[in-house]
Image (tube, rainbow, N blue to C red):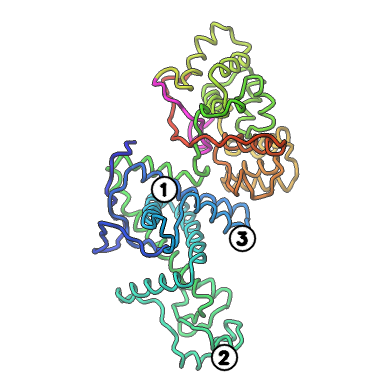
Amino acid sequence: MDSGRSRKLQSTSNAGPGVVEQHLKYPQRLSFYERPPLGEVTLEDFETWAIDRLRVLAEIEASFIRNRSTLELKSIIKLQTDKYLPLSANTAFTRDLDGERKKDHVSHFILRLAFCRSEELKRRFVKAEVTLFKFRYEDETREGQQAFSSTQQQQQNAASNASSETVSPEEKQRLREQLAVASNMPLKIVDEENYIKVPWTKVPSLVQQRRVFLSKGLAYVPASHQSTVVYQDFQTRLEKALDETEKSLPRLDEDDRLIPILEHLSRGFLAGVTSEYNSGDEVADGDRVTAEMVEEMSRKHWPMCMRNLQEQLKRDKHLKHYARLQYGLFLKGVGMSVEEAMIFWRKSFSSVSDDKFNKEYRYNIRHSYGLEGKRNNYPAKSCQTIIMNNQPGPQDSHGCPFRHFSPENLTLALSAHYKVSSPADVKEILEAVKAQKYHVACTRVFEITHNVPAREGVGEGESVTHPNKYAARSRELEQIRAGGGVVAPAPVPKKEEEIDEMDVDI
């Protein structure tokens, strides 16, 4: 992708005329994302901004699967948004407020394009986005909340589409006893509260909980519950906008630059967001992995996908092409040099003659290190790539065990390789697999086998999204517990590239 080329974002919703802004300004942190962004955005920013937002939404969805408490969920969202999608307050004069809010605005609309493609994707996107909006609304100051609500009310009034009305003091006095009973409040509190009345369909959760007074199709909502009106309004608008966006998708078929990006994003929820690692060139000398170290390290630090390949390699003294590719790039990523890789694979393929090894395997090993062919420095494969690409057949050993093993084989592997046999733990892992949250299942195995608190993940509540991330955190924990030296930082993320199919051999 040429990051220097730009694309003007076109509207894909029926926002109507008069929404073009040559210089986007965002006076508020909160947004209903009603006006599509128009302007120049590079393809690199188009993809990077969307992936950063997807990282946040993916952790929110993983939190639902893992039944995190409200406080834990808020902590996870704060960590993720501070890292990937910050929105500073207006008082943060040293921050690029317009830049932060533009990224938030544009990335939301990009993910609309990616997630409007099916009802399942729409549902999951809406749930995660509503949760993110709730967090931001509650994190906003009272003045910020009031300013946002006032802006929305003015826009609705201008469009003659007002959906709420302030309850007058006279009407509140006339209905005070009914309001007190419906809201389960003392009369004194009712007298001090401000109320609005909205169509009851705007607050179905409050109606279900019997927290509001209903009369003639209207719900009387106290100020303490008016945030529910805002949340429901955000959800309703987003659901409608996704339907409108879906109708506009055929226009994008003309642009073959965007379709692959959108397809990649829409698969992000399935495997967790990709988190690529470099080839290991920047690994400190003390962290280098030799051929002799692999067997022991596989038992202590490898995720199940790589542990399975190591076991298969020991048993058969051979791996097929895609299995070698998956395992070889992983080993490269954890710090194995090309020289040690030659030693490792030659020793592992002990039933193969030197002549056959040099003719059939040596080139591919060097190719994966960027020493042959196009000389690309290929990174290790992410969880998303392993799960979605090159599906394994009955005789293959590559892939993700959580995705490709039967429940029975997965249970046996958990017990044999990781000593995970507790019925409660196995049940939790299998439930995540059944829900197609394979990265969540892998993360739970990491927590159990490394004695870290549940929901801590591989650090700061993050889920496993890359085999090398699993291995790096495992080694880091070992060093910390052994009182060792300073742990080297994780390699810088890098875009994945596929190895040429012409180099495939069986």
Element under label 1? helix
Q: Is residue 490 magenta?
A: no
Depth check, front residue: 384 or 457: 457
The percent position of residue 335, horizontal first and vertical second, equals 57, 26
**Residue 476 placement (x, y as % from top left):** 64, 37
Q: Nearer the viewer, residue 492 or 77?
A: 492
Please report the residue visible at 30 percent of the width from the left and 39 percent of the height from the top: 4
Question: For mark 3, what is the residue?
Answer: 71
Q: Are marks 3 and 2 in contact (CB under 8 Å)?
A: no
Give the residue type at disc 3.
Leu
**Label 2 belongs to which residue?**
177
Instruction: Using the rendered view, name the quadrant where residue 209 is placed.
Output: bottom right
Q: State which tag comes first along the sequence, 3 or 1.
A: 1
Q: Please give the label number shown on residue 50.
A: 1
Considering every residue shown, the one lying at the far front of the view is 94
Separation of residues labelled 3 and 2 (CA atoms): 35 Å
| Kind of residue at badge 2 | Glu
